[in-house]
Amino acid sequence: FHDEHLIIASALKSISVRPEDCFFVDIGAGDGIDMSNTFLLAEQEAKGIALEFNPSKFSMMAVTYRALPNIQLARVPVTPRNVVALLEGLGCPKEVTLLNLDIDSYDYDVLESILLSFSFRFLCLEINPIFPFDIEFKVNFPATEWAGDTFHGMSLSMAYRLLRDNGYEITHLDRSFLFATRKDAVANPLQPIPSDRLEATLDQSLVGSSWDQVLKLYRGRPVGDILSSLEDLFAGKPDGAYTMKLSSSKVTKPTL
């Protein structure tokens, strides 16, 4: 959707790892082809696990992936409570080349659980770009299925803090796409985006895109006004459905 597959291919090339030597985990794999970030790896004989709960999407993926025996498929609802056991049961190694996570829901809670048990060379994640860096947001578990609106996922600041605390650095940001790498990986050629440039990088990626209106509505005003607008926007959500507060991720942001 945001050329994630190209970033992944470039990252693997930069560390001289061939697709056939990779192991990936794709959570929220969809039909395995349309807007898939891992299909090209699967086609090039990577090993992996693809999880999808939507029955029609999973059925389509199951048909296509009959020719890709290296990929284990499971139709299962992934939660922060079961994700580690699911991956372990499917034989996931502790050291994984790539995690792709996109469930449009409580992504943060699932990611937090996974990072306690598995290590990834690269992370391909979805963020919700409507939130400025000064506001932390995440959908809480449990949650209903995404309704196709702005209520989904996690903010950049929440993702940044979780990744930082678990030893990962953000190396690419493009609208709702975040790419990160484990910072203690040997000979890592990918340069992290300085923390004080994260918001500016995200803003620049939004200009002229389908997300352009987000800059005017939610990112270009005083943070107090934005927080109030977002609270009004989510007023109909059940109690405890989300966490939203001023950010505790302390970075100094430059003036644009």
Image: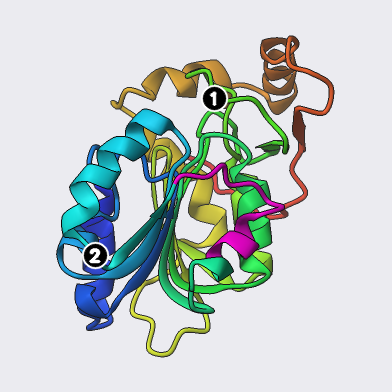
Q: Position of residue 42 (x, y in %)?
A: 23, 61
Q: Read off the residue under disc 1.
A: 146
Q: Quadrant of residue 250?
A: bottom right
Q: Which is in the foreground here, disc 2 or disc 1?
A: 2
- Which quarter of the picture shows residue 40? bottom left
Q: Give the range drawn in magenta.
A: 75-87
Residue 158 placement, left or right of 179: right
Residue 37: x %, y % from top left: 29, 51
Image side of residue 145 versus residue 26, left or right:
right
- Mark yes or no: residue 35 visible: no
Residue 13 in magenta? Answer: no
**Residue at the location (21% across, 73% down)?**
19
Dominant SS of magenta comes to loop
Give the CA distance from mark 2 to mark 1.
31 Å
Secondary structure state at the residue bearing disc 1:
loop
Q: Is residue 81 shown in magenta?
A: yes
